[in-house]
Amino acid sequence: MLGGCDASAKVRMDDYELLHNSAQSCERNIEYFVFKYFGDETEITIPLEYDGKPIVGLGVQASSVYNEFYLRNSVKRLTIQKNIQYITPRIYGLKKIETTNPAYQETETVPMELKEIYVSEDNNYFKSIDGVLFTKDGTELLLYPPRKEVNSYVIPDTVRKVGRISHIYAKHIYIPSKNIVLCTFSSTTENVFVPESLIDAYKAQNPYQEELFKPLPENWEDLIQPENQEDSPLDDESVNYSLQAKHVTLENAY
């Protein structure tokens, strides 16, 4: 459903830039994909459809050029409805740059300000737990909001992999699972607590972060700090954000 056509035609819907599979052979099965949101809202819900056709993805799975999703850095809370079947691993924050040319809105990629992600229970592909995005079966943590206000985070037992853009911006991370979780850790992380029997395996998987791994305490559940703390790891200006800034241009002449 998500492939087979060239997603190349751009359309504007309010503060969204969409792409659709516009190949002639696919005219009866047009689907839309969100490429950018550049509005000023702090909370947004991805629309269900455009012009009577479904919106099915954030980024375009079948495209090497448009397999990206740009989210305005004003957004703190993102809600994904039942229609979304695909979410690109290439998600960027977006900042507007003032311009005197009315035909264009110049933008720049910046760190996201996202705090929470919510997914409709009717979505068959994704779910959210405590504001964090997962695959429906819970085996992959896809996106941890970079401004999620917790100092401690427990990776659920079901998780086997943390997506490559999903650095967990918490100072203390607990991984109680007796299975290895494939992941890397951000520069804000101070401790990663894992079962003692797996410490060597985690160190081998993350040779440049060996000092992070420590035995999971028996009373680890009592050590978890409450959510919604005022300080966020990303408040530190020294954080080395993994995405390089670059310039893109939004064509507003529709």
Image (spheres, rainbow, N blue to C red):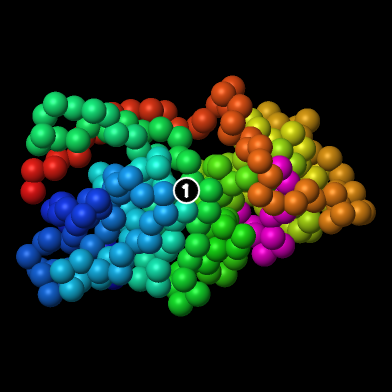
Query: Residue 156 magenta-drawn?
Result: yes
User: In the rendering, at what x and y percent does residue 130 appear?
Assistant: 62, 60
State whether residue 29 is above or below residue 46: below
Nearest to the observer: residue 113 or residue 7? 113
Secondary structure at badge 1 equals: loop
The quadrant in which residue 235 appears is top right
State whether residue 236 is above or below residue 12: above
User: In the rendering, at what x and y percent does residue 132 appear?
Assistant: 57, 56
Residue 151 visible at all: yes
Give the residue at x 35% y 38%.
94
Amino acid found under the numbered disc labelled 1:
Lys
Nearest to the observer: residue 177 or residue 152? 152
Give the residue at x 35% y 61%.
46
Residue 92 visible at all: no
Q: Residue furthest top?
A: 238
Please give left or right for residue 205 compared with residue 237 in the image. right
User: In the rendering, at what x and y percent does residue 249 appear?
Assistant: 21, 35
User: Which is the main secondary structure of the residues drawn in magenta?
Assistant: loop
Query: Residue 76 magenta-drawn?
Result: no
Q: Which residues are magenta?
A: 151-161
Label 1, residues with CA under 10 Å away: few <14, some 14-19, many ≥20: some
Give the residue at x 14% y 35%.
104
Please give left or right for residue 175 compared with residue 1 in the image. right
User: In the rendering, at what x and y percent does residue 121 appear?
Assistant: 50, 75
Give the residue at x 66% y 41%.
230
Residue wearing tag 1 = 76
The quadrant in which residue 251 appears is top left
Number of numbered tags placed on the structure image: 1
